[in-house]
Image (cartoon, rainbow, N blue to C red):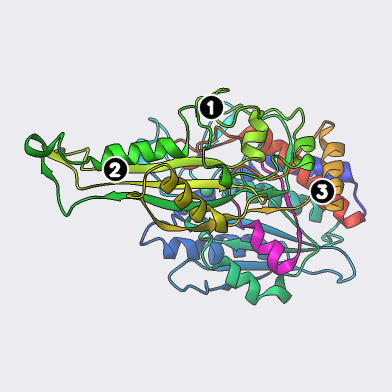
Amino acid sequence: MTGTRDGAIERAEKYFDDGGFLAELQRRVAIPTTSQEQDSMPALQQYVSGEMTESLEKLGYDCTVLPNPRTEYGPFLIARRVEDSTKPTVLTYGHGDVIRGQEEQWRQGLSPWKIVVEGDRMYGRGTADNKGQHAVNLSALEAVLAERGGRLGFNLKLVLETCEERGSVGLRDFVAGHTDLLKADVLIGSDGPRVMPDVPTIATGTRGTFHFDLVVDLRPGGVHSGHWGGLTTDPAIVLTYALGAIMDRNGKILVRDWLPRNGLPASVRSVLHGCEVGGGGEAASIDPDWGEPGLTAAEKIYGWNSFIVLAMVSGRPENPVNAVAPNARAHCQIRYTVDTDPATFAPALRKHLDAEGYANVRIENAGIRMPASRTDPADPWVRWTTASMERTLGRHVQVIPNSSGGLPGDVFVDHLDTALIWVPHSYNGCKQHGPDEHLLIAPAREGIAAFAGIWWDLGEK
Ligand SMILES: [Zn+2]
């Protein structure tokens, strides 16, 4: 039995159209793998040792579930299908954990743990981030295996983690400790959004995340707002002005040392030329006047750094008292590309705040949560994958130098020296970290076809 490329793609599309994919994803979405919640360990175990091991063993994979080097965090699954060590070896990645369900906030008729198909969407927690995305790629693999008569023609290894939503704790040590098992020529995986819902996308890296607290702590407790208001310094006001010194009212970062010293690299500017961004539906709007002046929307999120206040508080907004609060605190984030060194962020901020007269604003808990990573968009593996996808889908594939979100690609670059090829199947409006998370059906269907093509072509390589 020989089979054909078109045959593999047709099989994958048929599996999707006939409900096979939906049934498989439903089983996985039903497992509440909410890694940020205390009692989630049995569900995380069930996902890797039960559901995924059973599915992959049927396809001839050797599956091993191993504990996290940090024992209080979720386990890893390694699945390997090595046919011929002289053939290319691909590593693929996924994460089985999801953020909390937020059951009570979902729209009427929807639920995080049961998929509801409505129009062009499949609703459910993890449909976009990341269960739906790795299910797409593995379903395509099954189609290629069937079409080639039980053979792939290359070697595939999968690493599935269960604490990505907690910052991939333990992944670096885990990969470093299993480089022989995981060694590969390239990483091809899926997570995150396309640049636009209908534009097939390849991201060759991700932005990193750097977090810190800004703290104004002036006295041991609140003091009467009548006796002291107007006489003593208000920490909320100081914090607000300090934030204003970091970013102007139009979203331009004023700590210029946080930004790529030589502006946008030429290779990044060129690959992003003409790249459109958007299609987020009702999730949010792009405000053209927000952010770094002179950059396009694509350059702002794929080529530049952003500063975001994730949370801030002074006193107790839910239960105010007549007092000048003792302190104010903001938890902040920088999303950064490989063109800046995160080790300079905290010192640069300290210098900036001091120069602006905010010596009483402290920086606490500063550190990298997820490092940035990037493979050169001109890398041969990027060109090869782009060509394969364009052949399958019959249209332009947009390459971006890094995804706007975070993924632990740095770990694979550092320890396995692989090129990074991320092929996202979702879109900006998927609400992956809120209620009503969903996967768009059309990009998912294209994803399964595109991966059937990629997996088929790898066997011919
Ligand atoms: Zn996520």
At numbered mark 2, what does the secondary structure look like: helix, strand or loop? strand
The one of 283 and 454 positioned closer to us in this rendering? 283
Q: Disc 2 marks which residue?
A: 313
Q: Nearer the viewer, mark 3 or mark 2?
A: 2
Left or right position of 3 against 32: right
The mark tally for this picture is: 3
User: Is disc 1's CB within 8 Å of ligand 1?
Assistant: no
Question: Where, by quadrant of the figure, is residue 229 drawn?
Answer: top left
Mark toward the start of the polypeptide (3 vs 1): 1
Q: Disc 1 marks which residue?
A: 290
Mark toward the start of the polypeptide (1 vs 2): 1
The one of 411 and 452 positioned closer to us in this rendering? 411
Q: Position of residue 349 (x, y in %)?
A: 48, 49
Q: Disc 3 marks which residue?
A: 382
Residue under the image location 55 percent in, 23 percent down: 289
Q: CA distance from mark 3 to mark 2?
A: 44 Å
| Residue 89 visible, this orientation | yes
Residue under the image location 47 percent in, 40 percent down: 308
| Amino acid type shown at disc 1 | Trp
Left or right position of 291 against 206: left
